[in-house]
Amino acid sequence: MPLKLVIFDVDGTLIDSQAHICAAMDEAFGGVGLPTPPRTEILRIVGLSLPRAMAQLAPGLSQTGLERLVTGYKAAFGALRAETLSPLYPGARETMETLASMPDILLGIATGKSRRGLGHVLGAHGLAEYFVTMQVADDHPSKPHPSMIHACLRETGAEAIDTVMLGDTSYDMDMARAAGVHGLGVSWGYHAPEGLGAARVISEFAALAGALQAIWSETTA
């Protein structure tokens, strides 16, 4: 039986971190004397690496200014994270436990978070043990470049046809297409479901196992 791989995005897919993200953006933009972009614009760039995200939010800013934004955001987000923990979406933990118990399924992560940020989230929620491959922004180009997924495939030995990328943004789905794996969208995250460009979208974690089986059944039919 071939190994199957499910790769998870984090922000907007596993955890609801928008309160921390928006508050940190407010601190970062205030630190360089700029008005904070609207919440809708901020959520639209979630999933990108920080330098690329800031370049989209402040396109006319100098490189030095963008670097100050990135530094300010990291500092503010770290302080907020130390005070409160972004919650898991309903059903996330139970789904991880169920999938991890299946001998032919491996779990991975592809996120725009830093390694330190991801480690904090997984450690605080007690989820680190479930993932056998974890790809972060420190080591890869920003989504939608397929580098993160390619690394997941190398580290696990899974084939692209047996791999599903789960995410809440169009960047996740574009990355999946670029890597030649299946994309599966979620409706509870930061991009509108109709804008994901996903062949399938689930509305709750309880639907994930069934959606995965449907995808894999089609590839073997």
Image (cartoon, rainbow, N blue to C red):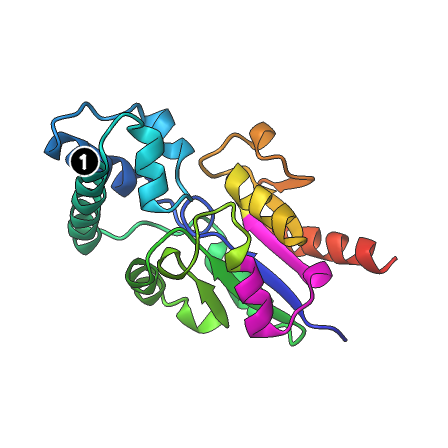
- Location of residue 209 with respect to 50 vertically, above or below: below
Nearer to the camera, 220 or 213: 220
Q: Main secondary structure of the magenta part?
A: helix
| Residue kind at label 1, given as amino acid type | Gly
| Percent of width and height locating residue 170 | 54, 37
Q: Residue furthest front?
A: 63
Q: Quadrant of the C terminus?
A: bottom right
Q: Name the secondary structure under disc 1.
A: helix
Horizontal side of 34 relative to 148 (left or right) equals left
Q: Quadrant of the N terminus?
A: bottom right
Identify the residue shown where x is 15% and y is 36%. Answer: 27
- Give the residue drawn at x 18%, y 55%: 82
* Crowd band around label 1 with a 10 angstrom C-alpha radius: few (<14), some (14–19), many (20+): some
Q: How many marks?
A: 1
Name the residue: 57% across, 29% down. Answer: 195
Which residues fall within the magenta stretch?
Answer: 149-166
Residue 168 shows in the view: no
Q: Quadrant of residue 24?
A: top left
Measuring from the top left, give residue 40's x and y in whole percent: 37, 26
Is residue 148 a member of the stretch shown in magenta? Answer: no
User: Mark 1 = which residue?
Assistant: 65
Q: Position of residue 193 (x, y in %)?
A: 57, 32
